[in-house]
């Protein structure tokens, strides 16, 4: 264990040293490195898939669920997808050096607020091996070094991917040590990593709620985490019913296992009898199990073919990550806002309404990273927002909120140019 | 103690409730409240100065230094100054609701990134009573509630000021509970306050290095702290000597007790014999004690009337906060950059140079909140930067860096407006 800790420390230290050079590595060099990484991922397909196959077999033997196995699995097509994503990041504008603000003060000083990298980013993630590549290239493009710590289920896949990235990055002229990968499976190492604030500037945990909580509670450095997305949709009395049904269907059904999927529908009492049977019919088509409050149960109980049951207290504020949805009839927009304030997780919340005043109140008053009027919560995503990529979705208000891509892993500095000015 | 903890918790909870209303209190109401606070500070002059007088007497009797007593002392003129500063903040643009970014996606969704308040800000500060007012009004203007915890030396002054602010804010229509003040002198309360992340979103410590370290090490919520400013000035071989002397004088002498004052001059060997005697003569005029490395000592030892002595290891990287300056001759810009990288605290660093390439390298490569070319480090200040006010100076890279004013105590949210869009 002590040897592993020493190695971890050495790697973090090397990352810090590399970050100081990466901070002013030209855009051209970074982009060439990313394209070389994209290419290397294809060249090394054999070894990557071979390693992934071993991970897969071991995971299968240990009884991993089919859904998790699917997340772990790589094939030629998926690897090609990962490689293409790297090219996408290469094509994005370099955030480093971007001038955020510039002005000349009355005394003639030129004040320039310039975007700079954060330094070293620690990534602690579970399962999906593509994260190894995604996070590495986003960090490199934004001029940050990275220390990667993946889950043990995909240890061999991650190692093969990280080695490929490291080699291609180094050969392309990026500073040695820019990408560090922690191999040892020892869980205690994470604890030590979280204390190395001297070397690691920011930690991004990606995984389930327990991992995120552990990182939040134990990290000595800054953390940006997303985590739980308990998403609501409020159907206002003025809503276009067709729109509202389509949005509720998309948000619940299109990909139920992700954080921006819909968990709970709140519907105004004056539209509930028209809206709910139509929505429930659609949900039933997709096999959604509905957990209904008293009033919605009363409305839906006579419809045929629905999988409905009375909601329990735990259903409110629950992230289902499955084809389950909670339904509640409310008396007013105010009741909906109170419900969301109490049970929401600050991720994505939506209103379906044709009333301007209600939409404005909802967008203003709901305290979440992303608030929607007449659109699906499923759009909360870096690529969908036009950021080109995503390193995670932040539900905190500090530093970055919502989808995080390149800019969100940068800081800034003030450059002040004068001609001998002194303070009076 | 338990009663105090309960009271603290109740106050933090009230602040959280107030913050939800403050977040969408109109600009007009906030500005009127600030003007009412400015006025109330003058109306209540008698009671405020009476309380301050008691604090002052007690501090004097306890042997507080003259400099600290001066920081504690209020009189009519200073109170008028505080009141005027509140009017300045009232006149600043409201950061809340500012549209940071807006675009229409190809699918027709209108994406708006809007500035919103952070929520509740906890302020833990020492000594200077004006901080009670400054932080309160900056928080209110940016739509944040605030929980104030001042130092015990100015307990009575802070209470009188906070009560004045609270009363005027409430009478002007700001939500009850927007400004909370912790009266109990029990130091252990700070510990409890730092764990209340459910109610307090951000803590800003203002005071000496030990306070800042304590807050950083113990806070469960986000922290923005400044603290130590170890500021260097590198005099390049190409520097205009007059400019460099004037800047070194201003940066060291104009107000030596603050974080943006100069601590160490690094001078290129090829200009040292010309520059140093001139600078030292000016410094000597102001009574600056000079801690010199071998080479600078050699240059200066023949000048008359200087207070010079050999530097010790501890002089490098030291924040003097006094009329003391370290001096070192370096062989190159690279050596200066290495010195600053090793000993700087990421606050403010300057170069005096007429060489474009050297200036560019310095501004790019020095990793600090504020980097200056041919200007005094003393400009690192919210008001000087045109921000109108200042809540502190951040030396961290996360969330905010450099002078922090209104925008720096906000977050943002994404508002997405559609017409029924669903994710394909």
Image (spheres, coloured by chain):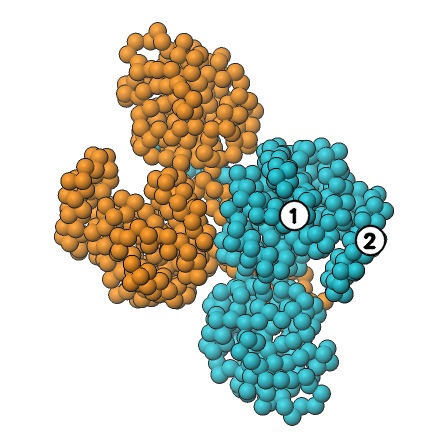
Chain colours: A cyan, B orange
Q: Residue, x 46% and y 16% (percent of image)?
A: B329
Q: Quadrant of the N terminus of chain B?
A: bottom left
- Above or below residue B390? Residue B417 is below
Q: Residues within 10 Å of mark 1 (few under 14, many from 20)?
A: few
Give how far across and how far down residue B396 sits, in percent.
47, 42
Residue assigned mark 1: A186
Left or right: A308 in relation to B383: right
Question: Given the image, what chain letter belongs to the residue carrying mark 2?
Answer: A
Q: Nearer the viewer, residue A400 or A123?
A: A123
Sequence order check, earlier mark of 1 and 2: 2
The residue under the point 24% across, 62% down is B167
Asked if residue B24 is positioned above or below residue B393 in the image, the reply reads below
Instruction: Tell which tag, 1 or 2, sits nearer the viewer.
Output: 1
Residue that numbered label 2 is attached to: A53
Q: How many marks?
A: 2
Q: Nearer the viewer, residue A245 or A209?
A: A209
Query: Given the current orientation, which residue lies at the most extreme top position?
Result: B302
Q: CA distance from mark 1 to mark 2?
A: 22 Å
């Amino acid at each position: 264990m002590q040897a592993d800790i020493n190695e971890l420390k050495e790697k973090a230290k090397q990352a810090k040293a590399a970050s100081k050079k990466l901070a002013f590595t030209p855009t051209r060099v970074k982009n060439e490195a990313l394209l070389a990484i994209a290419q290397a991922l294809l060249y090394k397909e054999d070894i990557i898939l071979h390693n992934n196959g071993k991970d897969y077999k071991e995971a299968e033997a240990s009884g991993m669920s089919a859904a998790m196995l699917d997340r772990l699995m790589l094939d030629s097509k998926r690897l090609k997808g990962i490689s293409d994503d790297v090219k996408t990041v290469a094509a994005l504008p370099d955030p480093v050096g971007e001038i955020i603000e510039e002005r000349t003060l009355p005394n003639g000083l030129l004040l320039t607020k310039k975007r700079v990298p954060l330094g070293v980013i620690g990534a602690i993630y579970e399962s999906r091996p593509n994260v190894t590549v995604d996070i590495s290239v986003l960090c490199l493009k934004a001029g940050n070094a990275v220390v990667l710590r993946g889950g043990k289920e995909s240890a061999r896949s991650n190692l093969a991917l990280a080695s490929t990235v490291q080699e291609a990055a180094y050969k392309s002229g990026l500073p040695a040590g820019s990408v560090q990968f922690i191999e040892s499976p020892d869980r205690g190492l994470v604890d030590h990593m979280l204390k190395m604030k001297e070397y690691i500037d920011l930690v991004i945990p990606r995984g389930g709620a327990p991992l995120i909580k552990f990182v939040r509670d134990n990290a000595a450095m800054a953390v940006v985490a997303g985590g739980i997305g308990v998403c609501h949709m409020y159907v206002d009395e003025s809503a276009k019913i067709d729109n509202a049904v389509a949005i509720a269907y998309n948000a619940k059904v299109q990909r139920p296992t992700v954080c921006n999927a819909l968990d709970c529908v709140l519907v105004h009492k004056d539209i509930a009898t028209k809206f709910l049977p139509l929505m429930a019919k659609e949900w039933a088509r997709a096999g959604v199990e509905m957990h209904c409050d008293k009033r919605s149960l009363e409305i839906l109980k006579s419809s045929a073919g629905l999988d409905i049951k009375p909601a329990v207290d735990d259903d409110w504020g629950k992230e289902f990550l499955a084809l389950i949805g909670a339904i509640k009839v409310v008396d007013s927009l105010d009741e909906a806002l109170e419900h969301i304030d109490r049970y929401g997780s600050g991720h994505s919340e939506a209103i379906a309404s044709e009333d301007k005043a209600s939409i404005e109140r909802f967008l203003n008053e709901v305290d979440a990273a992303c608030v929607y009027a007449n659109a699906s919560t499923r759009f909360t995503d870096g690529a969908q927002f036009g950021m080109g990529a995503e390193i995670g979705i932040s539900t905190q208000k500090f530093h970055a909120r919502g989808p995080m891509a390149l800019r969100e892993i940068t800081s800034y500095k003030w450059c002040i140019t004068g001609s001998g000015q002194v303070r009076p």
